[in-house]
Image (cartoon, rainbow, N blue to C red):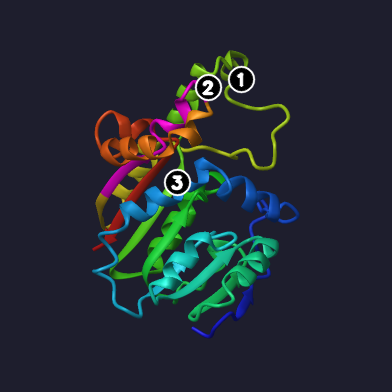
Amino acid sequence: MSDKKTQSSNSPSSQDISFDNIANKFDKNIYGTTKGRLRHEMLMHNLAFLWPVLNENACVLDAGGGTGEFTKELLAKGYQVLLNDISMDTLEIAEQKLADYDGLSLHHGAIQDIPAHSQFDLVTCHAVFEWLDNPQAVLSHLFELLKPGAYLSLSFFNQDANLFGNVLYGNFQLINNGMKQKNRLRLANHTPLKPKTVLNWLEELPCEVLKKSGIRCFHDYLKDKQQQSDNYQDIKQLELQYSDQEPYLWLGKYFHIVIRKN
């Protein structure tokens, strides 16, 4: 991969959600909060078993990687990373953020437009599926991009946890309306997914599920939101302890799956 070379696709899916024009707000709202911090740290914790397994110069795709926060972790480990996003604005922020790292390439366009002949040792696709028009088709394409024996790390907004949370918040009108918001914010998740649905999709593919865990199984449900920052380390310790245990993993606002291609 040539450093920081940007490839642009001419046919991004018009139905997939882009963060153009709100990229700075996205970066601040996601990574400047305890929600974003905990999500990021839990992903790193869940993937810690992979780092000794991957080759030192492994080729990695960060699909829908946005402003490059997770890409930075991958580059710091010495991997060759292709950062993809449908939003040019987020990629411009990422390019500035990652200017001091070697091994970065950029791809502007839909995930579906990444050439099928590209082959990766690891593909990460975090908090992306809920913004896609056809996530199952994208999953199939991501699977094609994996080398035999390679790994896919997939996280997405949990529809079951979203319903559970809205019951706790007393949003009964929203629930009775089929969870459809009349005035949806651009940063509000587009289409949450049921973990069992995605796991069923994976059963159709020749792969092994290595990890299933919830992310933010407790954090978002605290009655006193101030505790999310005041007691952050206590909450994180509970998340680390219970995130892969029944029944708590199904309550995570995000669901995380790691697979290996057969």
Give the residue number, with chain letter if any, for mark 3: 39
Residue 205 makes an appearance in the image: no
Q: Secondary structure at mark 1?
A: helix
Q: Position of residue 163 (x, y in %)?
A: 49, 24
Res. 4 image quadrant: bottom right
Q: Nearer the viewer, residue 32 or 148?
A: 32
C-alpha span from label 1 to label 3:
25 Å
How many numbered marks does the figure carry? 3
Give the residue number, with chain letter if any, for mark 1: 174
C-alpha span from label 2 to label 3:
20 Å
Specify start and end residues of the magenta stretch as a single range. Answer: 211-224
Q: Position of residue 242 (x, y in %)?
A: 27, 35
Mark 2–mark 1 CB contact (< 8 Å): yes
Q: Amino acid at mark 1?
A: Leu
Q: Amino acid at mark 3?
A: Arg
Q: Amino acid at mark 2?
A: Asn
Give the residue number, with chain letter if any, for mark 2: 166
Any magenta on residue 214?
yes
Mark 2 vs mark 3: give the one in front: 3
